[in-house]
Image (cartoon, rainbow, N blue to C red):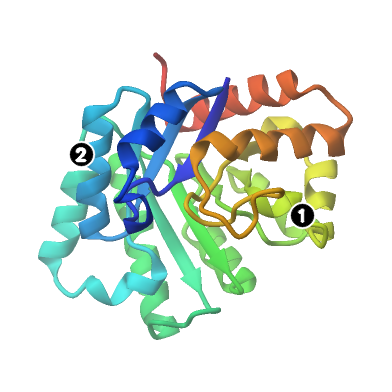
Amino acid sequence: MFFDTHAHLEDDKFKGDLEQVIEDIKNSDTSLVLNVGFNVEHIKRSLELSDKYDFIYSAVGLHPSDSLEADSDSYWETLYNYGKYPKVKAIGEMGLDYYWDRAPREHQKKVFVRQIDIAKELQMPIIIHDRDAHGDILEIVKNEKAGLNGGVFHAYSGSLEMAREVIKEGFFISVGGVITFQNAKKLAEVVREIPLKYLLIETDSPYLTPHPFRGKRNDPVKVKYVAEKIAEIKGITLEEVARETMKNGRELFRIEN
């Protein structure tokens, strides 16, 4: 029923009870999960999960906060080869993070562009991480024609105007648990005004836990609370949100079965 298009089940926060979490997902209305590896260590764990469970797929990339990890051509060769794995459906997450600023901004930009190039070579969609870097992200996306093979702005935090711009560039808007927060007025406006055919849903597990579980660990089962809030804001049924966001996710990540 639901497609959680961005999770991190390989995160250390799931180490103690991952098998139970997987069982809970199997017994829930969440039927597909895209697990996102954001550095080499996490990519390896993510690929192990997608190899083991048929409903889990992977994305491979380098988070801007980890971008100093890319220190040689062999690193990029490794990432490129991971991108050719059968259950890898996107390159990312990639982008810019000016909130944590854990790598020089110019370096973040170079690493972002390099991953866009890899995605183009592999003809794959990309997953963009954008935190407090809206202007520079949009400039790079436009200059590099980053949406050539499709993509998504995950855990979207920009304005309605920016959402309209990135859609023109070939991107979906992904909505996470923040939409359930009382102060999420800007995101609620985006959800209200952007047609459902451009929206995806996600958890970003174990982070961004939706209300009423805020403060606790997030997991893909809870993506339904995101869908419920979208349905409420748009005045449509939960079933319609589930059906359309599943269709959108399958289309973007080319998942047919």
The residue closer to the viewer here, 98 or 20, is 20
**Is residue 184 visible from the viewing direction of this image?**
yes
The secondary element bearing badge 1 is classed as helix
From what the image shows, is residue 179 above or below residue 234?
A: below
What residue type is disc 2 on? Glu
Q: Residue at x 10, y 63 (%)?
A: 74
| Percent coordinates x, y for residue 169 in the rendering | 60, 48
Pointer 1: what residue?
187
From what the image shows, is residue 146 above or below residue 64?
A: above
138 sits left or right of 8 in the view: right
Check the image and name the residue furthest to the top.
257
Q: Earlier in the sequence, mark 1 or mark 2?
A: 2
What residue type is disc 1 on? Leu
| Percent coordinates x, y for residue 180 in the rendering | 75, 49
Q: Residue at x 89, y 30 (%)?
A: 235
Q: Residue at x 60, y 64 (%)?
A: 138
Q: Quadrant of the C terminus?
A: top left
Quarter assignment of residue 170:
top right
| Percent coordinates x, y for residue 13 in the rendering | 38, 56
The residue closer to the viewer here, 171 or 82, is 82
Of tags 1 and 2, the one toward the viewer is: 2
Marks 1/2: CA–CA distance: 34 Å
Pointer 2: what residue?
48
Q: Residue at x 28, y 31 (%)?
A: 87
Quarter assignment of residue 49:
top left
The secondary element bearing badge 2 is classed as helix
Residue neighbourhood size for the residue with mark 2, other residues' Cα within 10 Å, grouped as few (<14), some (14–19), many (≥20):
few
